[in-house]
Image: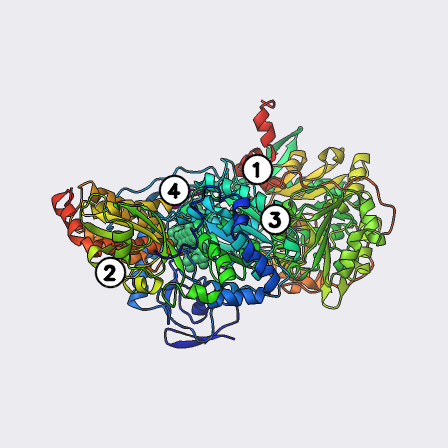
């Protein structure tokens, strides 16, 4: 068993209290940052660590931070993306609820490095408990002088606010998140300008995922080389994998990046709870194209999964055993995206509406000849043409389902019923 | 300048261009729905996707900045496929009810569907339906037709400056509308009808009245305010069916106000379509000969100095020229074109013009508004001010009635005392003006049409001079007129003559005392008719409004859509309105009426054609010899004097009804009901 980093304290039921944190290593990363490092040195350290964003796209964190202009008269902002809406994903919640101070500390270090004085944690609307935990933790951090004015007598000021979302999945997309904080309708913005130049209120802004930010204090304390020593070279560190579906031991697992999917599912997850054969696995939340059982010998890192036509995404691993109807999975998945499409762009808004209706009809046994081809055509007409990756993700997910399990779709058309149940 | 390759040919474009603009420059049309050059870029319809070298996915041409070395392809099978895909998606939820849609024939969706649509629908599922929204009396909303391009939302938030329109709901449930069920309160709302690429937003008054291909189109200018917005008048038979804006970058860009657009149904009501004579206290229809004979008889019996003429707010320059020359021939010095008694000083043209020019507002860097509410007096000017404001670095202050101008400004106070303080330099805003490089002020009729108007004019001149508003290449002194006829009247000298000529107040006083026996009202309806005493009133105009009600003789003229006529806007820009439909019945073009009457009176005017009248206008004032605006030389105008402490009052109580046409308009009546008197309607105490 490898060492736990991010989740090392989450078993302690009191660790959401600052006293418990301070008794361990709590806020030592921040203190070290303020005493021993210049902001530029921290950005360099994070760049050297090769930390890549855990929000889905795997963008190099140090590089993202380096885009923020140093000399600017405008305020800068740091937003933590705690919207965690991707189905099959529940890792950020673990941190927020059980170790909120590691996030606050990570944000304070990032803010210091970026010259930010105001931060927001954008919390998914449904995470009421988590939001309250965060608010309480922020109060404690202010009280103990880790937030607010002149933190640890360093002259550095940082105010942190919790902003609760209203439950729209699209608000996890960073520019929609920014619009939402501004009080606007949650939908993505045009890029360029990128948030690093013009983000929140038109000011330079960095948006990072909870898990990304939670890595920062550890990198500060132990160094870039330590971090690089875990997992594959181009995407090091530990990763929080969320196991769900037909798996015996669902839950959040902290394991090195690049662990084999089969190992994760079979050893850590204990295989299927029914003991039946695995049919397919979604490796990174429902936007990530599914892999059939035969493809499970793959490493869970950005590059390997991309090479296999899918992605690490949010690390939400959903296991499906052989009793699963893939047409139904497709219907539910596209139903989700159709429901969550923000409505801004035509291919996503109308294309997913169409695909969703067709899949519902197909699943209900009312398929018509040509439906499968129609679905494939729809995927082609949506993919690549949408404003933001939501529509693309939906099309890729559907395309993979049809590619690997076409016979099930055809069976639905021809027999008007499901092949497996 | 970035150089890019589009479909194998090189184009060099201005920095800041988008790929779409670069394509246009190269003569390549990119289909689009959401993009509009005057609105922010949305990039949401995806109709404009093109291929870009090294980009794995197609890019939205409207949103992609053109960069050096870019290689763009717009004519590949993949681009074609993408356009067809987007088109198909847009059509699945579109009702395709073109036969009953007013947009048909001028619908972007219909046009693009011809180019990129399939000849048969592949969609086999059910279509969505959207509940229609209440956009008020001007806009008919059929929201099932909406393609969510958000042009209307961007127009209302960006150009009109009202935050009442937006999208609610996600995905398939996304709907465009006012968040609460209420009419959209903007003087510019009709422009959304033009912007909406489909038939979701159409003109409510025009609904089902005509098909676009049945209309005869005439380019003209508007007279509902003194902006001189360029318009297109669409006529079927003899009836004006609708009015649309015509692009003029210097004046109205692509927009017109709701009054300019919708008051035209007033042209159908209360028209004077034949001469009338008062007989035994009652008006009776008469022939032209009878009417002229009655005038001739009265004129013969009256001394020259007992005759007076007032030109109204929509009088055209040709008619004013004819009437002025007729008055001179008759020997009367009593004429005026300032119905509201504004103390406008015609001695220097710069003293009564909007010298900065409307487009020039965009160069200004500070602005003081005095006794004006541009939002109702000239919505188009207000839109420019807002545009300038949004560009940043444009402090605006208002002395006058507190109001919502759609952009933030400092309200300095309501009385001339504040003006005095600014003029003396004691007020902090004087420093703002002094610091500015190109400061401007706008003086409204609310400041000039009062007892101390001349002193206020002088005070404003002082502010302009002291804060460096007038220098080489810049004149920040502006008068914002509300009457379309006013600057033309001033340019023509339709003003009291030197030999004791009476102004409007003098004419009314004289009439009350019996010294003025004949008053010739040229489309003048805004004076207090009760003060005309026992005078013999000749009313020449087109509507049965206040003037006609008081008249002894009515000479039916043409409305602005029914004559070839010149109007000079508040900037001093002479523009021509063109005859789009003939005047009704026996009504005639106005200058011709005066010309015919002059012959009956034995003083025949020396012009028989429009060219000759216009030559005469140019003779009176060289400004009529050209189009466009020329800088007017500065001078000393106004009269220094004591300022009355009474607050500046707004001249226009109801934006929607300001002249005989808009007062006769059922649509403007509905707007008055919806926007001006909503409180009254709610309480219901007025029955
Ligand atoms: C539709 C959509 C939903 C997203 N949802 C989330 C989310 O819930 N949480 C998250 O951290 N990132 C989400 N992202 C990714 C963010 O846009 C952004 O890339 C990320 O927050 C950056 O953080 P990182 O650099 O730390 O990975 C989403 C992206 C898309 C397109
Ligand atoms: S793809 Fe388009 S409609 Fe879908 S969520 Fe993104 S912007 Fe909204
Ligand atoms: S109503 Fe018209 S302009 Fe407004 S979003 Fe819909 S289609 Fe576009
Ligand atoms: S015109 Fe470019 S996306 Fe609509």
**Farthest-out residue, left:** A415
Q: In the rendered image, which residue does mark 2 sit on?
A: A297
Q: Marks 4 and 1: CB-CB under 8 Å?
A: no
Q: Give the x, y percent position of residue A378.
A: 27, 54
Asked if residue B410 is among those painted magenta in the image, a careful observer would answer no
Compute the Cα span from label 2 to label 4: 41 Å
Task: State which region is magenta.
Answer: B167-175
Q: In the rendered image, which residue does mark 3 sit on?
A: B379
Compute the Cα span from label 4 to label 1: 41 Å
- The answer to whether residue A329 shows anywhere in this view is yes
Q: Marks 3 and 1: CB-CB under 8 Å?
A: no
Label 3: how many residues lie within 10 Å, few (<14), some (14-19) or many (20+)? many
- The answer to whether residue B569 shows anywhere in this view is no
Residues indicated by labels 2 and 4 sit on the same polypeptide chain: no
Depth check: give the residue in front, B401 or A412. A412
Q: In the rendered image, which residue does mark 4 sit on?
A: B173
Tell me: is circle 2 under 8 Å from ligand 1. no
* Chain letter for the residue marked with disc 4 in the picture: B
* Chain letter for the residue marked with disc 2 in the picture: A
Mark 3 residue element? helix
Q: Quadrant of residue B306?
A: top right
Mark 1 residue element? helix
- The earlier-in-sequence mark between 3 and 4 is 4
Q: In the rendered image, which residue does mark 1 sit on?
A: B664
């Amino acid at each position: 068993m490898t060492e736990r980093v991010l989740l090392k304290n989450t078993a302690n039921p009191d660790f959401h209290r600052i006293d418990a944190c301070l008794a361990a290593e709590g806020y030592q990363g921040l203190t070290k940052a303020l005493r021993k490092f210049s902001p530029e040195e921290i950005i360099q350290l994070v760049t050297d660590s090769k930390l890549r964003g855990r929000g889905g796209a795997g963008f190099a964190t140090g590089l993202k931070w380096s885009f923020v202009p140093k000399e600017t008269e405008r305020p800068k902002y740091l937003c933590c993306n705690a919207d965690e809406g991707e189905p099959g994903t529940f890792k950020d919640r673990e941190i927020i609820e059980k170790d909120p101070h590691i996030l606050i500390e990570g944000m304070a270090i990032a803010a210091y490095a970026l010259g930010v004085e105001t931060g927001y944690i954008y919390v998914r609307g449904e995470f009421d408990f988590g939001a309250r935990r965060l608010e309480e933790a922020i109060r404690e951090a202010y009280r103990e002088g880790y937030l607010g004015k002149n933190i640890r007598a360093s002259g550095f000021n940082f105010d942190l606010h919790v902003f609760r979302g209203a439950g729209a999945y699209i608000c996890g997309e960073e520019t929609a998140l920014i619009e939402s904080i501004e009080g606007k309708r949650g939908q993505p913005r045009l890029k360029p300008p990128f948030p690093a130049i013009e983000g929140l209120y038109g000011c330079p802004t960095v948006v990072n995922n909870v898990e990304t930010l939670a890595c920062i204090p550890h990198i500060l304390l132990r160094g870039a080389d330590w971090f690089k020593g875990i997992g594959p070279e181009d995407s090091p560190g530990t990763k929080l994998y969320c196991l769900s579906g037909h798996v015996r031991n669902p839950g959040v697992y902290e394991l090195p990046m690049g662990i084999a999917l089969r190992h994760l599912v079979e050893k850590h997850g204990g295989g299927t709870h029914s003991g039946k054969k695995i049919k397919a696995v979604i490796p990174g939340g429902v936007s990530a194209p599914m892999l059939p059982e035969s493809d499970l010998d793959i490493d869970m890192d950005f590059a390997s999964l991309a090479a296999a036509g899918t992605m690490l995404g949010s690390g939400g691993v959903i296991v499906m055993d052989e009793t699963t109807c893939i047409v139904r999975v497709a219907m539910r998945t596209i139903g989700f995206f159709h429901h969550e499409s923000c409505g801004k762009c035509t291919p996503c808004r109308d294309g997913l509406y169409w695909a969703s209706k067709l899949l519902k009809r197909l699943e209900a046994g009312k398929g018509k000849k040509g439906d499968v081809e129609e679905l494939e055509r729809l995927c082609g007409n949506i993919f690549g043409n949408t404003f933001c990756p939501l529509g693309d993700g939906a099309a890729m997910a559907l395309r993979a389902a049809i590619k690997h399990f076409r016979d099930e779709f055809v069976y639905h058309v021809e027999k008007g019923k499901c092949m497996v149940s | 300048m970035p150089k890019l390759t589009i479909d194998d040919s090189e184009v060099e474009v201005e920095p800041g261009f988008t790929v779409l603009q670069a394509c246009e420059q190269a003569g390549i049309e990119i289909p689009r729905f959401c993009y509009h050059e005057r609105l922010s870029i949305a990039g949401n319809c995806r109709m404009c996707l093109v291929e870009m070298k090294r980009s794995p996915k197609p890019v939205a041409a409207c949103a992609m900045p053109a960069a050096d070395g870019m290689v763009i392809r717009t004519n590949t099978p993949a681009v074609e496929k993408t356009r067809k895909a987007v088109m198909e998606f847009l059509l699945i939820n579109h009702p395709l009810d073109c036969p009953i849609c007013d947009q048909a024939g001028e619908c972007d969706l219909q046009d693009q569907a011809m180019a990129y649509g399939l000849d048969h629908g592949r969609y086999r599922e059910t279509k969505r339906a959207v509940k229609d929204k209440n956009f008020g009396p001007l806009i008919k909303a059929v929201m099932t037709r909406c393609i969510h391009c958000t042009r209307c939302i961007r127009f209302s938030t960006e150009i009109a400056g009202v935050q009442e329109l937006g999208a609610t709901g996600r995905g398939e449930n996304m709907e465009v509308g006012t968040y609460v069920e209420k009419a959209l309160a903007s003087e510019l709302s009709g422009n959304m009808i033009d912007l909406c690429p489909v038939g979701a937003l159409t003109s409510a008054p025009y609904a089902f009245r005509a098909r676009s291909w049945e209309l005869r189109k005439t380019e003209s200018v508007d007279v509902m305010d003194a902006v001189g917005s360029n318009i297109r008048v669409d006529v079927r038979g003899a009836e004006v069916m609708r009015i649309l804006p015509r692009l003029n970058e210097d004046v109205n860009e692509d927009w017109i106000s709701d009054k300019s657009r919708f008051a035209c149904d007033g042209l159908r009501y209360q028209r004077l379509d034949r001469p009338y004579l008062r007989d035994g206290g009652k008006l009776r229809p008469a022939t032209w000969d009878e009417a002229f004979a009655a005038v001739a008889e009265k004129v013969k019996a009256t001394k020259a100095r007992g005759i007076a003429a007032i030109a109204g707010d929509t009088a055209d320059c040709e008619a004013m020229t004819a009437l002025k020359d007729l008055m001179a021939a008759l020997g009367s010095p009593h004429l005026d074109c300032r119905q509201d008694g504004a103390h406008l000083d015609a001695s220097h043209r710069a003293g009564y013009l909007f010298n900065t020019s409307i487009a020039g507002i965009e160069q200004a860097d500070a602005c003081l508004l005095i006794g004006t509410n541009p939002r109702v007096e000239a919505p188009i000017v207000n839109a420019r001010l807002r545009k300038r404001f949004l560009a940043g670095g444009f402090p605006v202050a208002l002395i006058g009635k507190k109001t919502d101008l759609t952009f933030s400004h400092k309200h300095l106070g309501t009385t001339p005392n504040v003006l005095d303080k600014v003029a003396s330099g004691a007020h902090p805003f004087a420093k703002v003006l002094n610091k500015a490089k190109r400061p401007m002020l706008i003086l409204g009729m609310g400041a000039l049409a009062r007892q101390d108007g001349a002193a206020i004019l002088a005070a404003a001149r002082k502010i302009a001079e002291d804060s460096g508003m007038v220098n080489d290449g810049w004149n920040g002194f502006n008068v914002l007129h509300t009457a379309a006829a006013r600057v033309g009247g001033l340019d023509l000298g339709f003003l009291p003559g030197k030999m004791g000529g009476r102004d409007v107040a003098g004419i009314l006083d004289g009439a009350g005392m019996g010294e003025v026996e004949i008053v010739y009202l040229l489309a003048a309806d805004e004076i207090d008719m009760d003060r005309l005493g026992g005078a013999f009133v000749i009313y020449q105009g087109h509507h049965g409004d206040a003037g006609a009600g008081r008249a002894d003789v009515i000479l039916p003229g043409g409305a602005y859509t029914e004559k070839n006529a010149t109007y000079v806007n508040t900037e001093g820009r002479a523009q021509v309105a063109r005859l789009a439909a003939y005047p009704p019945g026996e009504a005639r073009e106005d200058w011709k009426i005066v010309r015919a009457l002059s012959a009956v009176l034995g003083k025949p005017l020396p012009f028989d054609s429009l060219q000759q009248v216009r030559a005469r206008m140019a003779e009176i004032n060289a400004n009529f010899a050209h189009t466009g605006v020329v800088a007017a030389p500065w001078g000393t105008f106004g009269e220094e004097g004591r300022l009355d402490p009474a607050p500046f009052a707004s001249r226009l109580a109801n934006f929607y009804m300001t002249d005989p046409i808009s007062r006769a308009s059922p649509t403007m009546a509905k707007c008055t009901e919806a926007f001006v008197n909503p409180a009254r309607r709610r309480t219901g105490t007025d029955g």
